[in-house]
Image (cartoon, rainbow, N blue to C red):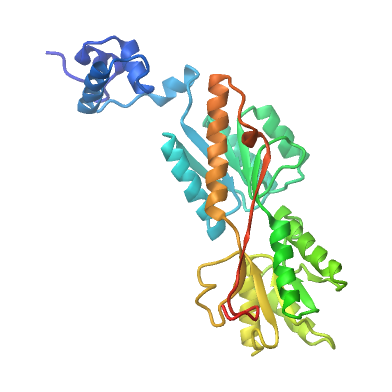
Amino acid sequence: MRKSSLHPTLAEVARKARVGTTTVSRVINGGERVSPRTLKRVQAVIEQLGYMPNQAARILKGERAKTIGLVIPSMADAFFASCAEAAQAIARANDSLLMVTVTNNDPHVEIENLNLLMRHRTDGLLLVPANYQSDTLAEFLRRMGTPVVTFDRPIINSGIPAVLSDNYNGARMATEHLIGHGHRRILCLGGEPTLYTLRERLRGYRQAMEEKGLTPLVDMSVKDYKSAQYAIESLLATPQPPEAIFTLKNSTTIYAFETLQMLKVAIPRTVALLGYDDFELASTLRPAISVIQQPIEDMGRIAAEILFENLAAGKSKTPPSKKSQTEIKLETKLVLRQSCGCKG
């Protein structure tokens, strides 16, 4: 009696199921042109023997690797972690593995990670580009020839589909709300001025201020708690201190809140506070912090859906939908709590 190997082969499955190897391959790849009865019998044998397709061999034959690369700035940032979880759910639904790499917004690390993912022959890439203006990155991705979708930030003039939140209108809405409370000296506080998202938010803030005839007050020096503390203390000591602070990202919101608490500045009576991006403790702090909320999970999910749609279109040679070829902007939401002066 022939002893079954430790790793059953496709031929062994075919022999035990009394079918040809082509039929087994069809069952593994979805069961097309296989009768329900035969499909059930082959699936039972696959389960009984514990057969696993040889993925490396399938890749060499030109089949999909069933892996997707995800390149993000950080896993410690709750924003990108949530996007990754949403993308992972879509990858699993498409029988694919999500491989995550981190760049820390370093373009050199980004290229290294992309090269590594290509050596693993990933089918497609989800990418948060370190530099949205990089011609080098755009050309690299063009040469690579692998389907790519960016999210949170685009790669301008690249033709690569992008899923973004409407940073400009979100910041504009936040600034207009603070102006509506009667504030005229509104400090826009942030850091990393080269990031696409922060530039768009700064643009929205400036537009809202200038439309009301107000002078923008901007400080983009914040890197950590100490720099935020220095910026806020310095401005509060001027003859015309800010009446409100609009922060451009959640870490800056936290630094600003802690600094105002430390200085015993009453929020919102003395200085109102409104931040871009919600975070876990924003609603539980006292006062609770008003924020612009992004559709984080939607961003990761939609980007992954577009990527798989493009992969399917490439396989079937059918043109992808219009959605898969364009820039999608998702609406943001103003969540009102107490820190801006609302009752919440």
- Across and down, in percent, residue 34 comes to 32, 15
Position of 39 with respect to 115 (left or right) is: left
Position of 190 with respect to 277 (left or right) is: right
Q: Nearer the viewer, residue 63 or 247?
A: 247
Point 65% across, 81% down: residue: 341
Indicate the quadrant where residue 96 lies: top left
- Across and down, in percent, residue 231 comes to 75, 77
Point 74% across, 64% down: residue: 172
Q: Residue furthest bottom?
A: 264
Q: Nearer the viewer, residue 271 or 343?
A: 343
- Across and down, in percent, residue 57 comes to 42, 20
Up/down of 89 relative to 202, above or below: above
Indicate the quadrant where residue 44 lies: top left
- Across and down, in percent, residue 252 comes to 65, 70
Up/down of 305 relative to 176, above or below: above
Position of 222 with respect to 128 (left or right) is: right
Image quadrant occupied by the C terminus = bottom right
Image quadrant occupied by the N terminus = top left
Q: Residue furthest top?
A: 20
Q: Is residue 311 visible?
A: yes
Point 64% across, 50% down: residue: 152
Q: Is residue 70 visible?
A: no
Query: How many numbered discs?
Result: 0
